[in-house]
Image (cartoon, coloured by chain):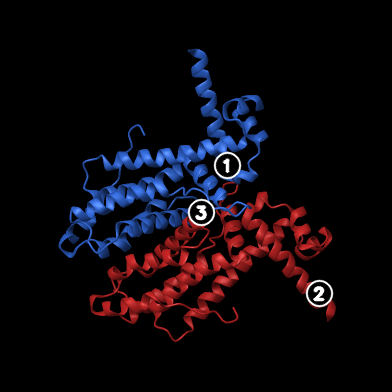
Chain colours: A red, B blue
Amino acid sequence: MAQQARAVATRQQIVSCAASAFDRFGYYGARVEEIVESARITKGALYFHFGSKEGLAQWISDEQHRIAVTTTDAIAATDAPALEQVVMLCHEIARQTVADPVVRAGIRLTLERGTSAAGGTGPDPYRAWTDGCTRLVRRAIEQGDIADYVSPHVLARHLIGAVTGAQLASRVGTLFADLEHRVDEIWQVLLPGIVPAGRHDRIRSVSTARWCASGV
Amino acid sequence: MAQQARAVATRQQIVSCAASAFDRFGYYGARVEEIVESARITKGALYFHFGSKEGLAQWISDEQHRIAVTTTDAIAATDAPALEQVVMLCHEIARQTVADPVVRAGIRLTLERGTSAAGGTGPDPYRAWTDGCTRLVRRAIEQGDIADYVSPHVLARHLIGAVTGAQLASRVGTLFADLEHRVDEIWQVLLPGIVPAGRHDRIRSVSTARWCASGV
């Protein structure tokens, strides 16, 4: 039992240090020697738990996908109207990319795989977010908070793209200090155009919707 | 004279091969040995022209900035209404990030510098585009094609962010095959909300605006 707990702790330690390295230096730049050293484990322990550097990278990509699915489901399960839930999701995606090195590393690794020297396309790190966002937009249209001429999938791709772009610009410009503000700006541009005229009184409160995670 | 032409050709050859390497592997992953080999030059020639790997990376970042400024100015100088010019600029940014390895490498290098291990912030690779776009939006408001409740800077940041995000998702998902379509989608979401009701008949033709570069 104690042995199992120790194994879990070791895995977490490896993942945490590897995520930090992949996030900072990318797949090619991250060195197994440095991950091992910062995690204070042996190379053997890393290979025992993850097989290889590639296996470790794959695990982190998968974990980022799992977190995205779990987050989207959790937000969809709240009592808030669907339009508020879409706003919550965009802010939560932004928050996670700042706060969670596993999320950042997973995105970077998946993007790098998609642009490998072999030239093949890879899995889409934004897929889970885009799918979840599409479902929420569809529900917001049913609830009359988004005009029915809006295409759920097109708006969802727009939102995830805009949040991703905001995150990149915010990272390089202010180390994420202005990211929440930038996501607010995305909604400031969009809401007057997608909320039906009869519901414009909702815009102010919709913009302030935030989700407080509990145990994702 | 022949010697000078040869020097220019050598520099171009180095830049082209280095851009390709930085674009694919990032600053850390790109190896001087491989750049030298693919450019069919000596290591000495590379150091003679650019001083160091860092100098080479800096040159490519600067060149990306220069291209962005030149492109924005050229589009602003056309006879098209400013709203069409904003659409042109978004598509041109997308096109360049597909067609020009120097643009792609410059963005990647600047982003990596912004997230260096030292934790400092770097220059913003989107700055020239955002500034140019802000000017065009301001003019489109003056021309009555964008509603005056829209903030030029906020819309410009939104657009550049959305195009950047679309480009990342398109790269990983389809190797850029659907990028023009994704930029069209960005406008499909935005135009009904930012164009004043009295000008909605312009939306269809505005969406198709494209810029044909000549000698940038």
The answer to whether residue B186 is left or right of residue A9 is: left
Answer yes or no: are tags 3 and 1 on the same subunit: no
The residue positioned 53% from the left and 27% from the top of the image is B11
List x then y, in percent, for residue A93: 50, 69
* Displayed quadrant of residue A161: bottom left
Q: Is residue B208 visible?
A: no
Question: In which quadrant of the rendered image does the N terminus of chain A lie?
Answer: bottom right
List x then y, in percent, for residue A83: 38, 77
List x then y, in percent, for residue B140: 23, 53
Q: Which mark is residue B22?
A: 1
Q: How far apart in space, not on screen, are marks 2 and 3 (Cα)?
A: 38 Å
User: Can you identify the residue that label 2 sits on?
Assistant: A6
Q: Can you name the residue that lies furthest to the bottom here?
A: A79
What secondary structure is found at the residue carrying circle 1?
A: helix
User: Can you identify the residue that label 3 sits on?
Assistant: A172
The answer to whether residue A163 is left or right of residue B143 is: right
What secondary structure is found at the residue carrying circle 3?
A: helix
Q: Label 3 is found on which chain of the structure? A: A
* Displayed quadrant of residue A3: bottom right
Question: In which quadrant of the rendered image does the C terminus of chain A lie?
Answer: bottom right
